[in-house]
Amino acid sequence: MITRGNWRKSSHSGSGDGNACVEIAEADDTRIAIRDSKYPARAALSVSAPVFAAFVGALKEQQRPLV
């Protein structure tokens, strides 16, 4: 079960109110839950851990400077 303390915001969410980002939580050993930090009471999206890792890896790849 995901509790309030399980949710983490991105370290890139910036200063200020910090509500313009997504939050993640480990739903269990194999799933990652994702929710909009502006609407935490709404339903969360759940994806497998490997799918989430691939998604984050693709984001990191896009941020690499082209030399």
Image: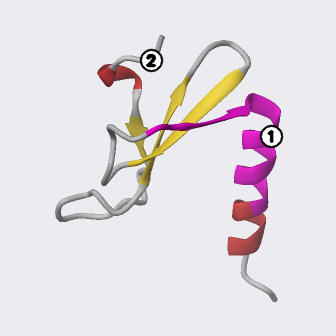
Question: If the image is split into quadrants, where does the C terminus sit?
Answer: bottom right
Residue 58 vs residue 37, the one in the foreground: 37
Q: Type of residue at label 1?
A: Val
The residue under the point 75% across, 52% down is 55
The residue under the point 40% across, 22% down is 6
Q: How many marks?
A: 2
Q: Is residue 34 above or below residue 39?
A: above
Give percent across and percent down for residue 40: 33, 41
Q: Earlier in the sequence, mark 1 or mark 2?
A: 2
In the picture provided, is 3 more to the left or to the right than 32?
left
> Of helix, strand and loop, which one carries label 1?
helix
Q: Is residue 56 magenta?
A: yes
Disc 2: which residue: 2
Q: Is residue 64 above or below residue 25?
A: below
The image quadrant that residue 41 belongs to is top left
In the picture, the disc for residue 51 is 1
